[in-house]
Amino acid sequence: MVPPGEFLGIVPSWVIVYLATLVCFGVATAILYVRMFRPILSGRPSGRLDQLPRRILGSFPYIFGQKKVLQSTDMVRDRAGVAHAIIFWGFLSFSLSYLIFIYGDSINNQFSSSLLTEKGIKVFGAYLDILSVSLLVVILLAVLRRWVFTANRLKFDLTQKSEAAIILALIALLMVTTILAEAFYVAALNTHSHSFIGNVLGDWLLTIGITDSSATYIYEASWWIHLAIILGFSVYIPISKHVHLVGAPLAFVTRQLGARGTLTTITDFEEAESFGASRMKDFNQKQLLDAFACAVCGRCTDVCPANLTGKILSPMHVVQGMRSHIADATLANSEKEIPSIIGSRIEREAVWDCLTCGACTEVCPVGNEPFHPLIDIRRHMVMEEPDIPEGAQSALLSLEQRGHPWSGTTFTRESWYEGLDVQTFSENPEAEYLLWVGCTNALEQRSQSIPRAMVGILNRAEVNFAILGPEETCTGDPARRMGNEYLYQMLAMQNIETFNRYGVKKILTSCPHCFNNIKNEYPHLGGSFEVLHYSELISDLIQQEIIKPVVEIKTKLAYHDSCYLGRQNGIYDAPRNVAKSIPGLELIEMEKCRENGFCCGAGGGHMWFEEGGSQRVNHARTDQFLDTNADTVGVSCPFCMQMMEEGVESKGVSESRKVKDLVELLEESLG
C-alpha cells in the first residue's frame, strides 16, 4: 500500500504514522508491564533460563513453524491448526509489509523499491494478494467452525466470549481495507499497483467512471483506517486473550527441556514461611507466564481424561483461573486483600481430579503445563490446611509409618521372591543392576507376577542383578504427586543413601512412576543414577538375540501406553518391540495411543482415593480397549495392570478379555 503524502492535506503522513505508533505502542507497553510482566516477575524463579541459546533456537519450530499447532491437527475432525497457522504466517507477512510500505515508504517513497527492487515488489505483492484472499477464506471457515458447526472444545463459556469475534472481524477488515486501498489508489492516479487484485479492481473502477476525487478520498480513508486497526491491535492485544502473541513465545523459550512430568523441588523447607501455592507470589514465574500464554483454544480440556469422564477439572479453566487470580492480586491494595486462589478461582475438587497424565501439556499449542500449578496447590492443601481426600490421607499415613502406601496388605517386601533364584545387594554387592521392585509389585498379589517374571527373564539373559529386599522403601512418588513434598523428600533421601551405600550405578524398574521419579527427580536431591525401564533393557536383549521368544502365543494384543513411560518420558517403541518379538502375537493399536494415549486413571495418587464424575477413567479406557476387539490388553505398569483388571471385571468380560504385563507374556514365550 502506497502511503498518502499528507494527512488531511496538512501534516506529512510520516509524522502521524510515527507519532500514533509511539503513543499506541507506549500505551501497550505500559499495559503489558502492569498486567503481565510485573505479576510474572513477582513469582518465584522457575529456573527455566538455563541453556538460553538452546532454548531460543529450539523454540523457533514451535513459534515460526507452528509445530504444536499443526501437531494437533486432524484433517478429518479438527483442521483448525492449519487455519491458525495461515493466520499466524499472515500476521508475520503483513507485519513485514507494514515495516516496508508504511513505515519505510511514508518517510522515503523510494524505500521499498530500493530495498526489494521493482521485481521483488511485484513478487511480494502477488504473495500478499494470495495471502489476503486466503485469510478471508480462513476467517469465514473459522466463523462457521466457532459459531455454526461448533467443535466440542469450543463450546465452553471461555471459548464463546466475544474476543475471538472481535479479532476475526478486525483481521477481515484489515484484508478488506488493504484491497480497497490498492484498488482506489490505482483508480485515483490511473496507474498500476504491485497488487494484481488492486489493478483488476482499480481498472474496473475506472471503467464505471469513478471520479479522481472520490477515488482519492476512499483510497486515503482505507489507508488510514487500515493503520488505525493495526495500532488498535497493539493496544487491544494486551487486554485480551490474544496477549498469547506475547506470552506464547516466552512460554516456549521457558519450556521443560527434560522429561515433562518432572516436578519442581522445594529446597528451603527450614526457611519457608509456607509450603505450596495459594496466592500469586507462591507460584513460579513459568506458571504465571502460562496464564498469559494461554490461547483459550480448549484443546487441553478436550483431551483431559478427568473432564471427559464428568469431573469438574478443566485444564483450560485452571490456567484462566490463574489469570483471573493474577488480576485479583494486581487490583488488591495489599497482600492481605488477595484472596486464595483455592475455592475462588480454582475449585478444590478440581485440584484433586488431576491425574498428572500430561495429556493437556501434549496438545497445548503454546507450550503450557497446566497440571504443574495444581501440584503446588495440592502441596498447600496437604501441608498447610490440611485438606486431603480420605483415601489419600490413609495412603500418606501408611507411607510415613510403613514406607509404602498399601496400608491393608498382608505381604512383606520379601513375599514376592520366595522360592526364586534372586540375591539381595548385601549378598551380591558386585551386581551391575539394581532391580527396583516397587511397592505395588512387591505388596499387591496380582502384580507380584511382574517382578517374578522379570527375575526369570534376567536370569535367562545372565544379567548380573540384585534387589534390596527388605531394605527397599517407596520412592516417595505417591506422596509427591499427592502434595506431601516433605514426606517425599524424606523417603527419597533414604533411598539415595541406600543406593550410595551399596554403590548402585544402574537401576532397572518395572514401574514407570518409580522410573520417572528416580531418573528425573532424584537428581534434584543429589541422587543421579542410570535408570532404565525394563522394556528398554529387554528390547535390547531381544535385538542382540541374548534372549529369543520361541513359544507361539496366539492373541490379539492392544498395548496401553503408560502416561509416565510414554508422554512423560517419550518411551513408545521399546515396549512395542517387546510385544512384536513374541511369535503369534498380533499387535493392535487403540485409537488413543502413543502421544495421544488415554490415562488408566491411577496417576496423581488416584490409585488410593475414589474419583467422582459420571464415569471412572479406567472404565472409559477399558471401553476403548474393547472397541479394538483385541483379546488382551498389554501393559507395562503395575498401576495400569490394576486399573485395567478392574475395568475388564466391571464390564463382565474377564473370561474372554485378559490383562497382561508384557514381561508375563515374554516369559511365557521364552518357554
Image: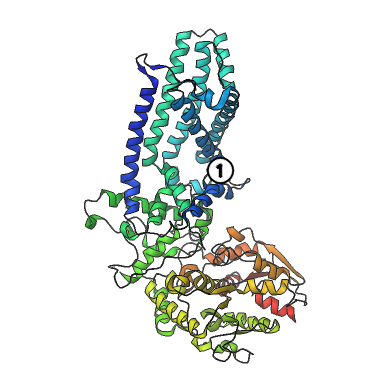
Q: Residue at x 44, y 27 (%)?
A: 103
Q: How far across and how far down the image is residue 374, in percent?
A: 41, 62
On the question of residue 99 being in view, the answer is yes
Tell me if 346 is positioned left or right of 610 in this view: left
Q: Amino acid at mark 1?
A: Ala
Relative to 122, say whether 451 is above or below. below
Foreground of the two, 422 or 645: 422
Q: How far across and how far down the image is residue 185, in percent?
A: 50, 16
Quadrant of the rendered structure where residue 451 is? bottom right
Foreground of the two, 206 or 111: 111
Please give the count of numbered marks on the rendered protein.
Answer: 1
Relative to 372, say whether 93 is above or below. above
**Image coloring type:** rainbow
Quadrant of the rendered structure where residue 373 is? bottom left
On the question of residue 404 being in view, the answer is no
Relative to 382, say whether 248 is above or below. above
Q: Residue at x 40, y 48 (%)?
A: 292
Circle 1 crowding by C-alpha within 10 Å: few under 14, some 14–19, many from 20: many
Q: Residue at x 58, y 64 (%)?
A: 566
Residue marked by disc 1: 80
Secondary-structure class at tag 1:
helix
Foreground of the two, 603 or 308: 603
Tell me if 451 is positioned left or right of 611 in this view: right
Q: How far across and how far down the image is residue 347, in percent?
A: 37, 59
Where does the C terminus fall, quadrant-wise? bottom right
Q: How far across and how far down the image is residue 432, in percent?
A: 60, 82
Quadrant of the rendered structure where residue 637 is? bottom right
Question: In the current view of this chain or complex, which residue is farthest to the front?
Answer: 114
